[in-house]
Image (spheres, helix red, strand yellow):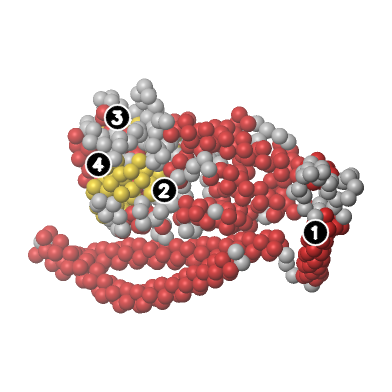
Amino acid sequence: MDPAALKGSWAQVARHGDAVPGYFYAVLFTAHSDLRAMFPMSMAAQRDRLVSALGQIVSNVDQLDAVVPFVQGLGRDHRRFDVRAEHYPQVGEALLATLAHFLGEAWTPQLAEEWTAAYQLIAQVMVEAAEKAATSTPAYWTARVVHHERRGLDIAVLRLRPDLPYPYVAGQSCAVEIPDRPRLWRYYSPASAPRLDGLIELHIKAVPGGQVSTAIVHGLQPGDPVKLGAPVGQQLVLEPGASRDLLLLAGSTGLAPLKALVEQVAAEGGRRQVTLFFGARTEIDLYDLPALASMARDLPWLTVVPALSHDPWYAGERGAVGDVAMRLGRWDDRYVYVCGSAAMTTATRERLLAGGIPAEQIRCEDFSNEPYRPKAGGAVTDTVFRGRVVTEFEEVPTR
Amino acid sequence: MTGYGDNSDHTHHDTSGWIPLSAERIRHQTFRETPLGRRGYRPEEVHLFLGRVAGEVDRWTAAYAEAQSEVHRLRNYFRNQGMATEEDRAREMSNEAITVLVRAQAHADRLIADAQAHASAMQLDARTQAESIVGRARQEADRAAHAYRARAGVEYNADREQSERLAALGRSILAAMSGATTQMEGASAQMRAIGDAFHAELEKLTTMAEAHGARLARHG
């Protein structure tokens, strides 16, 4: 392979921006109209994905070792989209047609050969990773909604019963697809540690303009089937064997994975002090306070402090959750877990660093190393919130 | 008939030196004579028949050549006149299909993004409005409590203050709600109009796609 030729020609094609994925998908669907049903109605988010994933692969093609784990992840994750081995040549043809279209005269037989070889290599790695994963895990888990409860203005708490055991640890999240919004996957975190009865509780806030979250909060009903992707995420998971006390900072439904961590600490014998700050806008948004209060009564090592940012009449703590926490205590010796909207997470992290908490003690979900992430400022859901869990955000198919 | 065919290999189907059978060859084909005492066809009749076959082959060959040159002429004509040959047409059709698809998808994406932006704005508005209604009601409640304390003097009673407070809160929220109901009617008419517009746009897209599909089917 000639990495310079691949990178150079890719850079030339990528200059055409959104026209590239637009053309690619049109070629693909013209040649294979049956593939259209595998994609969501709006292709806006899809555009970024294809270009950034390909860009990531091509720009590192001379360091295959660095690309292979990423490509394997893509292959494994594409199983839940029903991608099969026979789709790879079809996509390859569309890719070559797209390159030929945008490169014009520069598309030589030698270059075509380079790209064909590179694509075949990548496709092979993806197919093999998918086949290997298929021997140990299903492509996705099916589950039924057994409980759906509206809380506050725009939040729903639901419980799902998976048909097969769903193997996750507290703090992870899972991609969810509902029947009313096919092909749109969103990540949410289970709000409890794995339970004996296998039920999974999710806390979901309807993001203004969000296609999936609003449908889950306002439309989903008990009995509805949902699909769950394999559990992902290591940032918010408790390190095995660690014994430091914990400070948990939640913004709205970012509470879910942190509540699961509290249960995890309880399951491990409750040998750590845990202080949980639950931040929200107004009193009505403290959607899970009764459950938290009851846990705090039962667990002597747990303290729960609600804090409201937009409620001047509130008798309790007022202000941003990070400010309130730093005002009320010293946390230098604790591990700090932060979960909320992207804006809340960023602001809180900065506040903690400014307050002298070492960066290595702060844990939050971080997508800055996520190559398959959509560019900022795309769809409504991206600009409003891009945090995991709390909100609806464009999916991040691999880790 | 003494001529031994120098071209006897043709009659023996030797494929290695195969030469197309022309009218000329048929006409001059020779055959070896049968040994004495064996029966054979009359040479004159054979030659007469070969002559007729050669005549037929001549006719068909001429007709075929004429048809070929007509095909060439037409193909060149269309090429020179800028009209598409079969391969050109197939390529153009798929280019056209790709262009239509790119445009349709971009259009659909814009519609969905607009709908999302609109829904987002409405939901954010509703949230702001709800918070301001509650805020104003709480202010009114504080004011009512304050007024009660001022006029109660020695007859002050904490329960009474609380009921004054709740009554003011309720009045304020009720007033806001009746205002909101009127607004809701306006908003729902607006939503219906937007829904109709979306429906019309979607129908346009469907018609475009169907027309294109029919065209593709026609051109095979």
Q: Chain for mark 4?
A: A
Find out whether the residues at labels 1 and 3 contact each other: C-beta distance under 8 Å: no
Which residue carries the number 2 mark? A186
Q: Taking B151 as reference, is A181 left or right?
A: right
Q: Measure the C-alpha gap from mark 4 to mark 1.
A: 115 Å
Q: Measure the C-alpha gap from mark 4 to mark 2.
A: 26 Å
Which residue carries the number 4 mark? A292
Does B128 sit above or below residue A257? below
Q: Amino acid at mark 2?
A: Arg
Residue at the spot x=11%, y=60% of the render? Answer: B159
Instruction: Name the mark on residue A55.
Output: none
Q: Amino acid at mark 4?
A: Leu
**Badge 3 local density, few (<14 within 10 Å), some, or many (20+)?**
many
Local SS, label 1: helix
**Badge 4 local density, few (<14 within 10 Å), some, or many (20+)?**
many
Answer whether residue A272 is visible to the viewer in this image.
yes
Image location (x, y in percent) of residue B86: 70, 63
Q: Earlier in the sequence, mark 4 or mark 3?
A: 3
Which residue carries the number 3 mark? A265
Local SS, label 3: helix
Q: Amino acid at mark 1?
A: Glu
Q: Amino acid at mark 3?
A: Val
**Badge 1 local density, few (<14 within 10 Å), some, or many (20+)?**
few
Whether labels 4 and 1 share one chain: no
